[in-house]
Amino acid sequence: MTGKGIGTQYIDQRKIYEDGTRSLSIDNPSLLNFPCSRMDIQFWNNIVLLGSDTTMIKHNTNISNFNVVYDDHSLFHYFADNVEVMEMIHDKFMQAENQGKLKKSEVYTPLTLLHPDDIGQTALDIAVTTNRPKSLEVMIGMLTGYQEVMLSKLMLSIIPRMINNANETTLVFYNNAIYKPPLMQEAMIIPWPNDLDEFIFCSETSIMTQN
């Protein structure tokens, strides 16, 4: 959306909204950026009007569609209690990941599962409150492997449920849920001064070995 500014006296002035619904473009000062396009909204409208037909959704969506958060709600929130649709999304994502066909914009799509809505509920919370254990299982499956992101602090509300209903997917998640910040992505060797019996150095929480 382009414009000439506010009024005629301050033609270069732009109003920036605090709620994040729109922002000033850095590259083009006369351009306002909106987080959702008209097509995004139309896409959501079609989902609501045409119903949750799994086959239709499978053939008319791509993984990046699930990145969109509109008014604090994502499609994961909308489909959290629909087991068939959640299994379809899971299979679609895992197949693309295993075949190396994930686009850069799709790699972190599952993290949208942890986005809180306007009352603080994530899609995982909705799966728990609506008693959809299979939906919760496939969600956890998609969240496995993001060691560079501290996921557990965003999942505190459902961890008791995960422990009480442990399954293979949950065990795989916990076996891989070791937070590794950038400094821990590669092994770091710290030289030990020969003249010291004890050596104290600063380090992030890490896994240390005798070697």
Image: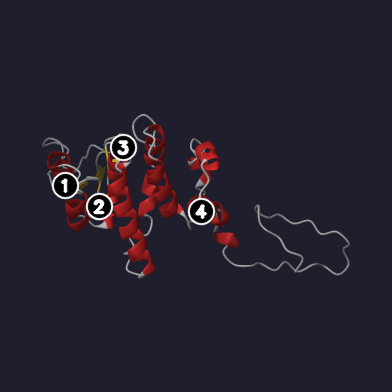
Looking at the image, is mark 4 or mark 3 earlier in the sequence? 3
Looking at the image, is mark 2 or mark 1 earlier in the sequence? 1
Q: Amino acid at mark 4?
A: Glu
Q: Which residue is mark 4?
A: 168
Q: Nearer the viewer, mark 3 or mark 2?
A: 2
Say the numbered circle drawn on residue 65. Answer: 2
Looking at the image, is mark 4 or mark 1 earlier in the sequence? 1
The image's colour scheme reads secondary structure
Looking at the image, is mark 3 or mark 2 earlier in the sequence? 2
Q: Disc 4 and disc 2: Cα gap in Å?
A: 29 Å
Q: Which residue is mark 1?
A: 43
Q: Disc 4 and disc 1: Cα gap in Å?
A: 35 Å
Q: Residues within 10 Å of mark 3 (few under 14, many from 20)?
A: some
Q: Residues within 10 Å of mark 2 (few under 14, many from 20)?
A: some
Q: Which residue is mark 3?
A: 72
In what quadrant of the picture does the C terminus appear? bottom right
Residues at discs 2 and 1 in contact (Cβ within 8 Å): yes
Residue 94 appears in view: yes
* SS type, badge 2: helix
Q: Amino acid at mark 1?
A: Phe
48 left or right of 177? left
Residue in the picture at 33% in, 41% down: 80
* SS type, badge 3: loop
User: Eyeballing the image, is 98 above or below 14?
Assistant: below
* SS type, badge 1: helix
